[in-house]
C-alpha cells in the first residue's frame, strides 16, 4: 500500500479572521487553501491519488504516488488524473521533444504551469515564451502539485492558461537537518543518483535550506547514443517577525541523443527499430550519397531511406530559474506577497540533414535549431479577510526576449575526420556555412485579477472574480532578404475574463461544486520550419500571407464549465465530474513536408467543443490493500472545415488529433510488514492520428510494477530501502507520442515515436537525520 497519505476528513469553510498560513505546500498540518480548511486525520476513507481541495481543484501529494520511478519527470506524476494522458519515448521522459501531456483536450503548452510560484508559460518543446517543466527542479523533490484541469484560477499567472493549471511546489522546509541518498541502476545502463538535503533551522533565528541534486545517465534502448541529465534546485527561507523571505533557484543541463520519428509505413517495412544510423557513419554516408539514390537499401531505395532516417538526432538544453519571494503580514486580516524572478532557456535541437549537403561534398550536414528565451518578471498579491469575505487581488508583469535561427554545419568527408555528434560541438569543421529563419521577438505579458470567496453558510462557499490580461508579441524575421521569415505584431487583450464557482460541503464525507471560467491565451511564438506541433502565425511562409491572416486572427478564448462531486465512505472514495469546453478562435497548424524541412499551414478554427467526464474510485479492500480505478472520457469537435485556398479539408465534427478519447488507469497497491507492492495499468483508446481522423493510433496499454523492502530498526542500516521497478511489464510495442512534428490533414505522416520496451530498475535509498 502507498505511504499513508493525508486523509481529507473535512473540507469546511474558514470564516474566522486569522493570519494565513505561510506553508503553501501540502503537509500533515492543517493548510489553508482558497479558504478551504483541509484537516488531516490518521484514519478515514480511502484516499485517492488526487484529493479535492476546492471547486475543480485537486492536489497530488508526491508521498501518495509510490509507483513513481526515481528520475522520472514532473509530468509523469499526472498520469493518474482521470482524463489526463501522459506519454514519453524514453523510460524516464528525459527527451522533452517526445514528451506529451493532454488534460481535457489541452496540451501541456496550453496550461498555466508554475513552479514555486514562477510562471513557466508555454511549456512545449522549442518554446520561445516559456520553460519546460521537465527541465525545472528535481522531480524527486516535488512535494505537491495543485491541479485545476478545466479553467485556471484567476490567481494563476501565465500567458498560456487556456486549459487549466498545474502548480508545482517543492517539499516543506523542515526544522531538523536531514539527508537522503538514492541510487538507481537499470536497463540500458541507466544510472540515477539523487541527493536531497535539508539544513534544518540554522541557529536560533537563521534560515532553513533545502537542496536537491540529480544526475541521470541512460543509453538509448534502440540504436546508439547516451542521454545525460544534470539538474538541481535550492530553496532557502528566512523567517522575520512579519513574514518570511524565500529564495528559489533551479538549474538543469541535458545532452540527449534522441529517437527518430517514424510513420506507420516505416513500422510495417522496417519494424519498430527504425532509428538513426549513428554511429555507423559509413552506412549513413552511402545511403545519403546522390549516386546511390536509386539503389536498393532494403524496403526503400537509398534516396527514400535517407529522407526517413537521419545519421543522428538530439538536443542540448540549459534551463535556469531564480526567484525571491517575500510574504508579509500587515494586519491580522491583511497579508500578501511580492515575488521577482528571472528564467532563461537555451536549446540546440539537431538533425543530420540529407537535403543540405556540406560544402566539402559530404552528402549531408548537421541542422541545428537554436531557440533561446530570457524572461524577467514580477508579481504582487494581497489577501484581505473581512467577515464572510476573503478578498484576493494581484498583478503580474513579464517581459521576455527570444531569438531563434537554424544553422547548418559541415560534416566531414568519409575517412577524413570524426563526424559531428548530436550533442556537439558543431563547429569542428568551421562555423555554420548557412543560416536560415533568423528571428527575434519581444513579448510583454500583464495580468490583473480580483477574487472574492464568500462564505454563504457553514457549508456553502461562493467564489467570484475576474482577471484582465494583455499579451503582446512583436518581431519575427531579421534582415531584408527576400526569403526573410515573416515579421509583425499580435496582441491578445481582454479586460474582463470572469470566473465563478460554488462549493458545497454538507458533511465531512461529501463535497460538490460547479465551476465556470473564461480564459484567454497569448499568441504562440515559433520560428519558421519549427520542429514541433506549436501553431504559430510566425511559421507562415510568406509575409503577404501573414499580413492577410493577421487581420483575421482573434485571440483564443475558452469557456469551461465543470460540475463535480466527491463522496467518502468508510473504505471507499468516489470522485466524478462532467465538463464542457467551448473554444473559440483556436489556431490550427497542419504539417506537410519532411522532418528536415517542415512546412506548417496555419488557419483559424472559429469554434471547437470538448465534452467529457471523469470518474475516480479508490477502495481500501483490506487494511493492507488499496485499489484505484480512474476513467476519463472526452470527445472534441471541430466546428468547421479547414480551408486552404480552393481546397477544403473536411474536419468539421472530427476529433482533435493526438488526444485519446478514453483513458483508463488502474492501480493496485499493498503493504505487508516492511514490504510494499504495486502495479499500475494505463490504457489510452480511440486516439485520432490526423485532422480528418482517417487513421487512429493503436490502443496504448502499459503495465508497471514495483516491490520495495525497508530494513527495520534491528538491522545494520535501519531505514535502508531496496526497490525493484519494472516498466512495461509485458514488453508491448506501443506508440508513445503520436504528434511530435505536428499532424497531417490525412494519411500517414512521420510524426510518431514508440514508447520504451520493458525497463527494469533496482534502486536503494537511505535517509539520515
Image (cartoon, rainbow, N blue to C red):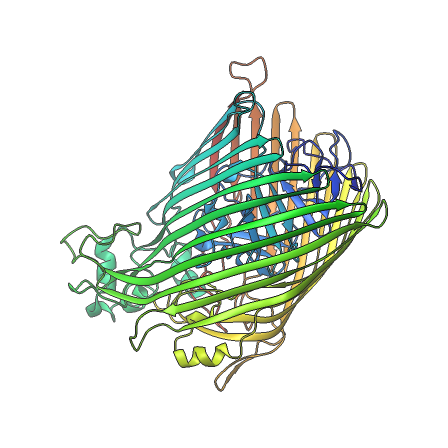
Residue 709: x percent and y percent?
57, 25
Query: Looking at the picture, how far across and down is residue 361, in whole percent?
Result: 16, 64
Q: Is residue 378 left or right of residue 43?
A: left
Which of 409/486 is in front? 486
Farthest bottom residue in view: 646
Q: Residue furthest left?
A: 416
Q: If the image is split into quadrants, where does the C terminus sit?
A: top right
> Could you tell me which residue is drawn at 24 percent across and 68 percent down?
295
Pick the front one: 632 or 445:
445
Q: Is residue 593 left or right of residue 722?
A: left
Image point (24%, 52%), residue name: 420
Q: Which residue sits at x=48%, y=74%?
A: 602
Instruction: Report which quarter residue 623 is drawn in.
Output: top right
The quadrant the N terminus occupies is top right
Q: Is 578 situated above or below 457?
A: below
> Does the rendering let one see residue 61?
yes
Tell which residue pokes out farthest to the front in this image: 330
Q: Locate residue 285, reporting x and y percent.
A: 22, 60
Q: Position of residue 508 (x, y in %)?
A: 82, 40
Amino acid at each position: 500500500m502507498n505511504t499513508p497519505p493525508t486523509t481529507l476528513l473535512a473540507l469546511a469553510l474558514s470564516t474566522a479572521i486569522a493570519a494565513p498560513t505561510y506553508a503553501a505546500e501540502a503537509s500533515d498540518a492543517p493548510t489553508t487553501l482558497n479558504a478551504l480548511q483541509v484537516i488531516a486525520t490518521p484514519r478515514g476513507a480511502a484516499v485517492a491519488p488526487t484529493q479535492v481541495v476546492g471547486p475543480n481543484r485537486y492536489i497530488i501529494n508526491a508521498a501518495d504516488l509510490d509507483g513513481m520511478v526515481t528520475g522520472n519527470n514532473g509530468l509523469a506524476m499526472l498520469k493518474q488524473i482521470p482524463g489526463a494522458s501522459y506519454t514519453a519515448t524514453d523510460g524516464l521522459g528525459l527527451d522533452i521533444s517526445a514528451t506529451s501531456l493532454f488534460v481535457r483536450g489541452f496540451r501541456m503548452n496550453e496550461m498555466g504551469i508554475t513552479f514555486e510560484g514562477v510562471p513557466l508559460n508555454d511549456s512545449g518543446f522549442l518554446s520561445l515564451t516559456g520553460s519546460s517543466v521537465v527541465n525545472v527542479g528535481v522531480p524527486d523533490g516535488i512535494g505537491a502539485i495543485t491541479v485545476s484541469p478545466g479553467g485556471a484560477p484567476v490567481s494563476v499567472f501565465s500567458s498560456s492558461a487556456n486549459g487549466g493549471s498545474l502548480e508545482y511546489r517543492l517539499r516543506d522546509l523542515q526544522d531538523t537537518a536531514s539527508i537522503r541518498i538514492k541510487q538507481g541502476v537499470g536497463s540500458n545502463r541507466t544510472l540515477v543518483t539523487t541527493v536531497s538535503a535539508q539544513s534544518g533551522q540554522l541557529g536560533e533565528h537563521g534560515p532553513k535550506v533545502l537542496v536537491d541534486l540529480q544526475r541521470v545517465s541512460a543509453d538509448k534502448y534502440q540504436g546508439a547514443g547516451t542521454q545525460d541529465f544534470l539538474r538541481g534546485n535550492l530553496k532557502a527561507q528566512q523567517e522575520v517577525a512579519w513574514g518570511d523571505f524565500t529564495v528559489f533557484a533551479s538549474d538543469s543541463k541535458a545532452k540527449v541523443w534522441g529517437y527518430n520519428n517514424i510513420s506507420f509505413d516505416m513500422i510495417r517495412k522496417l519494424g519498430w527499430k527504425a532509428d538513426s544510423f549513428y554511429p555507423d557513419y559509413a552506412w549513413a554516408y552511402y545511403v545519403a550519397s546522390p549516386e546511390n539514390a536509386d539503389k536498393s537499401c532494403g524496403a526503400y531505395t537509398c534516396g527514400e531511406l535517407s529522407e526517413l532516417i537521419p545519421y543522428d538526432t538530439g538536443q542540448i538544453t540549459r534551463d535556469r530559474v531564480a526567484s525571491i519571494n517575500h510574504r508579509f503580514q500587515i494586519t491580522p486580516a491583511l497579508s500578501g506577497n511580492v515575488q521577482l524572478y528571472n528564467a532563461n532557456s537555451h536549446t540546440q535541437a539537431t538533425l543530420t540533414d540529407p537535403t543540405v549537403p556540406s560544402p566539402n561534398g559530404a552528402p549531408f550536414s548537421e541542422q541545428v535549431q537554436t531557440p533561446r528565451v530570457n524572461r524577467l518578471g514580477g508579481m504582487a498579491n494581497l489577501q484581505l479577510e473581512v467577515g464572510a469575505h476573503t478578498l484576493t487581488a494581484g498583478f503580474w508583469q513579464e517581459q521576455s526576449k527570444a531569438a531563434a535561427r537554424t544553422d547548418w554545419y559541415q560534416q566531414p568527408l568519409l575517412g577524413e575526420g570524426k563526424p559531428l555528434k548530436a550533442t556537439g560541438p558543431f563547429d569542428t569543421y568551421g562555423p555554420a556555412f548557412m543560416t536560415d529563419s533568423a528571428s527575434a521577438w519581444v513579448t510583454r505579458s500583464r495580468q490583473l485579477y480580483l477574487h472574492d470567496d464568500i462564505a454563504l453558510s457553514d457549508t456553502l462557499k461562493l467564489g467570484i472574480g475576474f482577471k484582465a490580461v494583455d499579451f503582446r508579441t512583436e518581431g519575427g524575421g531579421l534582415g531584408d532578404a527576400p526569403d526573410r521569415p515573416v515579421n509583425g505584431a499580435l496582441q491578445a487583450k481582454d479586460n474582463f475574463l470572469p470566473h465563478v464557482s460554488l462549493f458545497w460541503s454538507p458533511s465531512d464525507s461529501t463535497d460538490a461544486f460547479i465551476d465556470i471560467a473564461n480564459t484567454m491565451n497569448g499568441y504562440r511564438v515559433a520560428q519558421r520550419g519549427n520542429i514541433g506541433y506549436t501553431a504559430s502565425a510566425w511559421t507562415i511562409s510568406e509575409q503577404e500571407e501573414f499580413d492577410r491572416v493577421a487581420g483575421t486572427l482573434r485571440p483564443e478564448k475558452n469557456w469551461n464549465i465543470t460540475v463535480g462531486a466527491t463522496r467518502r465512505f468508510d473504505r471507499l472514495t468516489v470522485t466524478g465530474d462532467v465538463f464542457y469546453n467551448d473554444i473559440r478562435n483556436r489556431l490550427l497548424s497542419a504539417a506537410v513536408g519532411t522532418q528536415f524541412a517542415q512546412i506548417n499551414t496555419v488557419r483559424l478554427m472559429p469554434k471547437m467543443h470538448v465534452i467529457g467526464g471523469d470518474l475516480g474510485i479508490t477502495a481500501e479492500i483490506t487494511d493492507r490493500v488499496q485499489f484505484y480505478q480512474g476513467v476519463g472520457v472526452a470527445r472534441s469537435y471541430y466546428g468547421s472545415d479547414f480551408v486552404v485556398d480552393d481546397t477544403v479539408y473536411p474536419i468539421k465534427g472530427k476529433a482533435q488529433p493526438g488526444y485519446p478519447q478514453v483513458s483508463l488507469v488502474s492501480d493496485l497497491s499493498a503493504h505487508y510488514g516492511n514490504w510494499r507492492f504495486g502495479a499500475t495499468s494505463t490504457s489510452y483508446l480511440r486516439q485520432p492520428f490526423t485532422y480528418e481522423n482517417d487513421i487512429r493510433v493503436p490502443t496504448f496499454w502499459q503495465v508497471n510494477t514495483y516491490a520495495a523492502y525497508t530494513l527495520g530498526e534491528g538491522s545494520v542500516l535501519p531505514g535502508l530501502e531496496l526497490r525493484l521497478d519494472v516498466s512495461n511489464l509485458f514488453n508491448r510495442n506501443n506508440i508513445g507520442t503520436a504528434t511530435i512534428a505536428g499532424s497531417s490533414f490525412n494519411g500517414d505522416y512521420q510524426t510518431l515515436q514508440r514508447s520504451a520496451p520493458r525497463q527494469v530498475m533496482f534502486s536503494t535509498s537511505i535517509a539520515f537525520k
